[in-house]
Amino acid sequence: MKRLEEMIKQEGLVLSDQVLKVDSFLNHQVDPTLMWEIAYEFMDRFKDAGITRILTIEAGGIAPAMMTALRLGVPMVYARKTKSLTLNEGTISAEVYSFTKQQTSTITVAEQYLQAGERVLIIDDFLANGEAAFGLAKLVEQAGAEVAGFGIVIEKSFQPGRQKLLDAGFRVESLARIKKLEAGEATFVDPVTV
């Protein structure tokens, strides 16, 4: 997605060869116009997949997931990373390691918000090693639902997440695929020219 790649080039901060900071438009401050365009792209790519629900993980995936759910006309639910007093019974959970935070979290969703037989599109802001993606897929499988695919805003293609998901038989659609982070710049896999 050309506009997303341009935003990454203009406003993204390459903190290391592993870390890209996009707080100015995705992870802290959110650009709603860009999210609407991202949602359109995901809607277009998954329009024939029979999506009945969107699932994401707090917090960076919420904005693109919500806009995509709005575009597709389906509900969106997000997995919580911290246990809430109100989320104490009838839950499904999985362990997820975060490279960025360098910690393992238990992600949780109320069973009533993921139903057996649903076709779930998992949306997330980043794909790196695939830990969050596989954790979310475990939630879907525990619910008796089916993962229809993964919609990734920014993929770090130099890390193994994409290949691991493909090897597991999942469909992966990434809007910006980063080949490398080096010398303060992001280089893209097959940059979009249109």
Image (cartoon, helix red, strand yellow):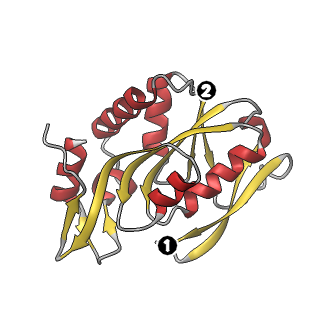
Q: Quadrant of the C terminus?
A: top left
| Residue appearing at x 67%, y 61% in the figure | 82
| Residue appearing at x 50%, y 43% in the figure | 171
Q: Examine the rendered structure and indicate whether residue 84 appears above or below residue 1.
A: below
Q: Which mark is residue 52?
A: 2
Q: Nearer the viewer, residue 20 or 189?
A: 189
Q: Examine the rendered structure and indicate whether residue 86 appears above or below residue 148.
A: below
| Residue appearing at x 44%, y 25% in the figure | 71
Q: Quadrant of the N terminus?
A: top left
Q: Is residue 28 visible?
A: no
Q: Nearer the viewer, residue 166 or 93?
A: 166
| Residue 103 pos. (x, y %) | 59, 76
Q: Is residue 153 visible?
A: yes
Cα distance between the residues tagged 2 and 1: 30 Å
Q: Earlier in the sequence, mark 2 or mark 1?
A: 2
Q: Which mark is residue 45?
A: none
| Residue appearing at x 28%, y 39% in the figure | 34
Q: Is residue 81 left or right of residue 10?
A: right
Quarter residue 135 falls in: bottom right
* Kind of residue at disc 2: Thr
SS for tag 2?
A: loop
Q: Nearer the viewer, residue 99 or 70?
A: 99
SS for tag 1?
A: loop
* Kind of residue at disc 1: Phe
| Residue 168 pos. (x, y %) | 59, 53
| Residue 10 pos. (x, y %) | 15, 57
- Please give the residue where the numbered disc 1 appears in the rendered image: 99
| Residue 12 pos. (x, y %) | 24, 61
